Amino acid sequence: MAVPTLVSEAADVVGGRRGSTNSVRNHGIDWLLFGPAIILLLWGLKLAASACYNVILHPLKRIPGPWPAKVMPFYLTSAEAKLDRAQVLLKLHRKYGSSVRIGPNEVSIGDWRLYREIYGGSVPTRKTHSYDIGNFLGHHNIFSFIDKAQHRARRKMQSQPYSLQAIYENEPLIASKADVMVRRMIDLARQPTSGGTVEAYRLCGLFSLEVILKCAFNREYGEAIDGESWEFLQAMDEGAMSLAIRTVVPFLKPSVGRRLPGFVGHAFHQFDKWHSMTSKLCQDFMRTESSMDKTQRFLTTPLLTNKDDYLGRKLTQGEVDEEAMGIAFAGSGTTSTTMTYLLYALSRPEGQRIQKTLRLELNTAGETLRELQDLPYLNAVIKETMRVFPTIISTLPRILEAPLTINDNLVLPAGTVVGMQNLVHHQDPDLFPEPEKFLPERWLDAKANKDMNTALTPFSIGTRNCLGQNLARAEVYLATAKVFKRLSLTLSELMTVQDMKMDDRFNVVPHSRKLLLNVEAI
Ligand code: HEM
């Protein structure tokens, strides 16, 4: 018996050892199985707790909105991916009213009366970090600065050539580019293969870029529609995609991005091209013009010659390039989209009567900017274009630095992200009956209706309003006058409504990126 006992003891010992090995393994397996489950459970509990807080206890709990938006910050992600953010916000405002909670800590405001509070400085606000996407080379620029003192100094440093006085001095430069656009339309319409049809979106893009190249760098690339201006425009347009890619994949270094195949690599290469073309423009301007330009009417002169008070010094080459890329970017897509939609609105069948009324007015007036700015119908057409087709269509997000009262019993606390979008308050049916219709006449007695003018905010207001608005307005007045004095336009039957859907890329881009017009010289 002793042997079996010994044997069994030995077996027990071995079995025991085996048992402990198994138990270690089993624990390992248990941990492998249950560990992630526990982590998931804890994560789920945390989400549930924060969802309960967001819905039941959050200071924004009384702001109406779709419930998923109250719980998670991704409610608008799919709309953003479909380039429909502003349109979805318009629908939400129609459903929920003038304030809509669109994220746990974010509220969209649709009441035009609050624009002044949020952007005009009545309540202190600052830009959010979403503006980092406009930081091209990592130096920050006038558009992307969040810090107020840095922004103030940079704006003061470069504002002189954007003044109305400087724009009047540059009027011949702008007018000459508008003449080029009209010439191109006539020449293209006369080409035997065109059948009188012209793709005008590209021409509007070239016009606004060439104005910037001239007014910023005193540079002309010639009149060919596929020359260096077009190369620059494409590099900028496609290169900007790399900024969006880097926002989604922040760890993707440009040195790696350039090596990737397909559209990602292409976007990084185009960005480099845009950068090097801009840098060369700045250096050429510095060599040939800046010392001679005592008037400071070129947009780049102050960047090269003035001191930034915040930095206490002039800008480095990298900082100059950063600002100059911003000027080209902010100054071209915006004006070109506005011109594109103005031509579209007037060339549609329902726009023919507007075109005729406008032409009658233009034929009785002079051609200078000052004279054009006094024409009631031209003013009405431009305002209505900016109302129905606001090129900065999307939210301008701000963080409240003090509480904001949005109605008698609702207050948004400091720290809330708020934003308004032109597409929403420009469609207010109380101020603009039949808001979707393009009716310039609604502006003709606008003096009687001060509110309509207050609610029209294409260039925003306050310290972060559009620095280039005098230039942009001059471009639109001069180009519209020249086009409709010399040309009669009808929309090509090949165009669909979907082609001109406003894609919300912050700045509008027509969905098909084309505007086919039948052009007849008068
Ligand atoms: C129709 C044409 C244009 C429209 C509708 C427009 C609209 C706007 C809007 C709404 C903003 C404020 C953006 C925000 O707060 O996030 C802005 C900012 C800006 N725009 Fe324009 N813009 C136009 C043309 C131009 C042009 C031609 C230039 C210059 C050449 C320009 C330069 C700028 C700059 C530098 C800023 C940033 C200002 C700052 O933060 O201090 N824009 N623009």
Image (cartoon, rainbow, N blue to C red):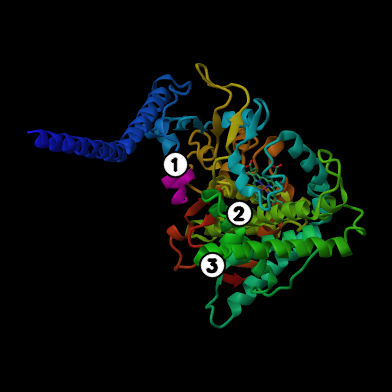
Name the amino acid type tagged 3. Leu
Measured Cα–Cα span from mark 3 to mark 1: 35 Å
Question: What residue is shown with label 1?
Answer: 76
Contact? badges 1 and 2 (CB < 8 Å): no
Name the amino acid type tagged 2. Thr
Dot 3: few (<14), some (14–19), or many (≥20) neighbours within 10 Å? Answer: many
Q: Does residue 250 lie above or below 68 as drawn? A: below
- Residue 366 x, y percent position in the rendering: 76, 57
Name the amino acid type tagged 1. Leu
Q: Main secondary structure of the magenta part?
A: helix
Side of 211 where 127 appears, left or right: left
- Residue 299 x, y percent position in the rendering: 79, 53
Residue depth check, mark 1 versus mark 2: number of the one nearer the observer? 1
Contact? badges 3 and 2 (CB < 8 Å): no
Which region shows up in magenta?
Answer: 77-88
Q: Is label 2 within 8 A of ligand 1 (CB to nearest ligand atom)? A: yes
* Quadrant housing the C terminus: bottom right
- Residue 46 x, y percent position in the rendering: 39, 28
Question: What residue is shown with label 2?
Answer: 338
Choose the circle earlier in sequence order: 1 or 2. 1
Most extreme residue toward the front, as rendered?
2
Q: Is label 3 within 8 A of ligand 1 (CB to nearest ligand atom)? A: no
Residue at the (43%, 58%) spot, across then down: 498
Residue at the (30%, 39%) spot, across then down: 28
Magenta run includes residue 169: no
Most extreme residue toward the top, as rendered?
409
Secondary-structure class at tag 3: strand
Q: Which mark is residue 517?
A: 3
- Residue 373 x, y percent position in the rendering: 73, 49
* Quadrant housing the N terminus: top left
